[in-house]
Amino acid sequence: MGDLLTALPQQSHLNLIIAADVFNYIGNLTDIFKAAYQALTEDGWFIFTVEKGSQFPYELQNSARYAHHQDYISQLAEQTGFKIESIELAQLRIQQNLPVEGYVILLSKPRAH
């Protein structure tokens, strides 16, 4: 996670951050959300996927990947200051001939008033 956090700029100059099939390797996403919010310009987008979890806030699965509860993602987004644009259930991939369900999440950084 350290590499991911240091890769994000400290100043707000990114319009878009995309992280597909990344956060299933990280349980607690608090620092990631804070860094993404700081790195984005106003009206910037944070788009990512997480595997669907049934335990709040997240769980380490037998696959050694994390699954995140939808309420955790929503709560974390709101606490960080993001606006939730969309959380959609989707099939993220096929693993061992079985579909892996998860969420495709679109967050935006609102303009300051």
Image (cartoon, rainbow, N blue to C red):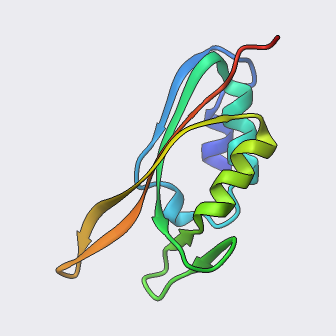
Depth check: give the residue in front, 105 or 39.
Answer: 105
- Examine the rendering and report whether any part of residue 27 can be seen: yes
What's the residue at 74%, 18% (across, down)? 11
Furthest residue to the left? 97
Q: Quadrant of the N terminus?
A: bottom right
Give the image location of residue 108, x and y in percent.
Answer: 60, 28
Q: Quadrant of residue 103?
A: bottom left
> Above or below — where is 31 with respect to 85?
below
Residue at 64% x, 67% y: name it. Answer: 27
As drawn, the residue found furthest toward the bottom would be 62
Q: How many marks?
A: 0
Q: Is the residue 97 above or below the residue 2 in the image?
A: below
Residue 1 visible to an observer of this rendering: no
Who's the residue at 60% across and 68% down the image? 69
Q: Quadrant of residue 89?
A: bottom left
Where residue 92 appears, as percent x and y from the top left, is: 31, 60
Q: Nearer the viewer, residue 60 or 81?
A: 81
- Which image quadrant: the C terminus? top right
**In front of the other: 68 or 70:** 70
User: What percent of the width, then of the height, locates residue 44?
Assistant: 58, 21
Q: Is residue 67 left or right of residue 36?
A: left
Picture residue at 72% right of the left edge, 14% below the top: 111
Residue 79 as seen in the image, left or right of residue 39: right
